[in-house]
Image (cartoon, grey):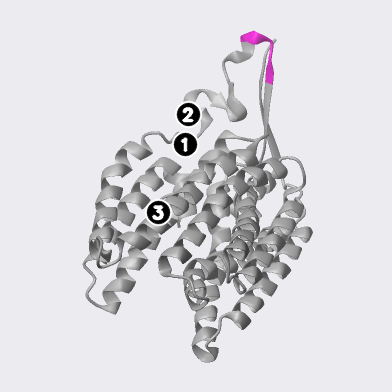
Amino acid sequence: MVGILVDRIGPKNVVFLGISIIGVGFILLSQTQSLGMFYLSYAVIMLGASGGGWLPMMTVINNWFDKKRTIAMGFGGLGFSIGSFLLVPALAWMVEPSQVGWRMTSLGLGIFFLIAVYPATRFIRNSPEEYGEVPDGAASNETDQGKSFEIAEYEYDILDVIKTRVFWIISICHGMSSMLISAMTVHLILILKDQGFSIQTAALIWGFTMGFSGLAQIFGGVIGDRIPKNIALCVFGCVQAMGVVIALYIDSVSLATIFVVVYGLGFGARIPLGSAIRGEYFGRKAFGKVLGFSMMPMFLMMMIGPLFAGWMYDNSGSYDTAFIILASIGFIGSIGFLFAKKPTPPTRSTASVASG
């Protein structure tokens, strides 16, 4: 739904709606008195989150960049990592009853999102064509400078895309690797708590991991613009799976540091690569829908990951087996990217802006 909206009403409008919905969701969460209300408020937050950031902003970046698409997406994803690095430890402190408390923290977040949404979205520019430009910063009126600019776009529509084998390979393999992300996000702090760390220390470890993943996004962007993106996704996906295994054995600061570096590198580098490969393979025309449709199997698997880990823990009293299985699934999904070759487009339309 978000992908369709992005292509129809523009990323800026979708982000405005998404962030507004997030604000309403946090305000609802602050008033929660029952499990049903918790589920409802969380659903509202996640509905807003799906349209409030990553998908529409990756579409914007894909619209503006071609030659340096991956590194641009790496910089574009820094906000996620920086936000996690700063906010996870801060929120772990704020929600303590002796501090602000979770209700007031949630209420404050909701109000902040509603206040910040308008000024934040004013900076979003949907596409270069709206400003008389073309991707990679070349102005369409620069024909008097003896330059020639050409944009090659493959005219995929969403029906063409979902008929291609590589679309499903990317979607399913990305989903298999993303199961690790959702499971770690939900359970890592609990794993570390079981291994003797306090909640605040565990949150700090996760925060540092997300901070390091921000640097890894830049590295992944550089690599992705130099070697085939499917090979890079395979390598970094395997590194991420290794980080998940390491998490099960963290009992000291040195092992925590190794985890931060290994998992942060694999997780962070994959972020721009996963978006950029879709832009490279399927072009700009239907990128929002391509990203949205491919997220359907991905989110289904991301939902299964933490549920499976929680079920295994409840039945065995340990996370070990669950996360070894999930890491194995991540390895298999990463190897699958080697089979994600760039498809041959059904038609091609070339728009040229050339000088005399």
Identify the magenta region: 144-148
Residue 276 percent coordinates (x, y): 64, 46
Residue 57 percent coordinates (x, y): 49, 44
* Residue in view at x 65 percent, y 77 percent: 324
> The N terminus lies in which quarter of the figure?
bottom left
Of badges 2 and 3, the one in the foreground is 3
- 279 on left or right of 204: right
Q: Which of 151 and 338 is in front in this view?
A: 338
Residue where numbered disc 3 is placed: 87
> Residue 126: which numbered mark, if any?
1
Vertical placement of 310 versus 129: above or below? below
Q: Nearer the viewer, residue 3 or 332?
A: 332
Q: Nearer the viewer, residue 310 or 154?
A: 310
- 238 on left or right of 82: right
Of callouts 2 and 3, which one flags the residue occurring earlier in the amino acid sequence?
Answer: 3
Place residue 320 in its image quadrant.
Answer: bottom right
* Residue in view at x 40 percent, y 46 percent: 15
Q: Is residue 146 magenta?
A: yes
Residue where numbered disc 2 is placed: 130
Quick one: label 2, few (<14), some, or many (20+) residues within 10 Å?
few
